[in-house]
Image (cartoon, rainbow, N blue to C red):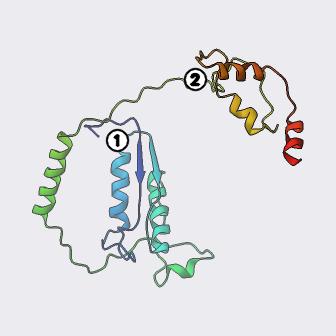
Amino acid sequence: MDWYRPGAVVLQCGADSLSGDRLGCFNLSLKGHGACVEFVQSFGLPLLVLGGGGYTIRNVARCWTYETALLLKKDINDELPFNDYLEYYGPDFRLHLSPSNMENLNDPKYLEKTKIKLIENLRSVQGAPGVSMNEIPPDTYLGSDDEDEEDPDARISERHRDRRVAHDAELSDSDEEDAGRRFDDVAFDDDDEDEEEED
């Protein structure tokens, strides 16, 4: 936060790091996961919180419920209320997960070394670039100054469309192109062209 000084934060709260996830091999409790959300929220910046991965659906639902309550600063019961899906949360029917007996291999020295390495890496990275906001210029069709808008539903033949590629003010060294431009000034009926193709 000190290095980038963001104006807002987007936080993705993937739940595959929770205890009991079918694919994740971590052992976080809901309180541990939620502490990360509270930490980021403590900076007081505009915060957009998104869901994310998680392969034990009932635990993903628990996680998002708990973290929504944290963001709203609401206390919620650990005992789940009766609902149509209560059977999925058995046998304890509680919000919070019990961490498994997985051994914690995160040695404090290893964690400290990793933290120092991350901070050193951040020092070698420039801060986030500023993005200037500019007004988007209006759309123009091939530089045309015509104020008359064409009917978008009207059918335009490919031959007629091809003739629009060269702008009238464009200079040309070719007599053939000039002749083609003079032909553009002559009105023609697309229906007549279609009839000729059918014959």
**179 to 54, vertically: above or below:** above
| Residue 73 visible (yes or no) | no
Q: Disc 2 marks which residue? A: 137
Q: Residue extending furthest bottom? A: 91
| Residue 157, horizontal then vertical, whole percent | 78, 38
The residue depicted at 29 percent of the width and 40 percent of the height is 1
**32 to 46, vertically: above or below:** below
User: Which residue is nearer to you in this view: 178 or 110?
Assistant: 178
Counting labels gives 2
The residue depicted at 40 percent of the width and 30 percent of the height is 131
| Residue 100, horizontal then vertical, whole percent | 31, 79
Q: Disc 1 marks which residue? A: 43
Dividing the picture into quarters, in which one does residue 122 lie? top left
Disc 2 crowd, CA 10 A, few/some/many (<14, 14-19, 20+): few
The answer for how far apart the CA atoms under marks 1 and 2 are is 37 Å
User: Which residue is nearer to you in this view: 170 or 62?
Assistant: 170
Which kind of residue does numbered mark 1 sit on?
Phe
**188 to 67, vertically: above or below:** above
User: Which residue is nearer to you in this view: 82 or 37?
Assistant: 37
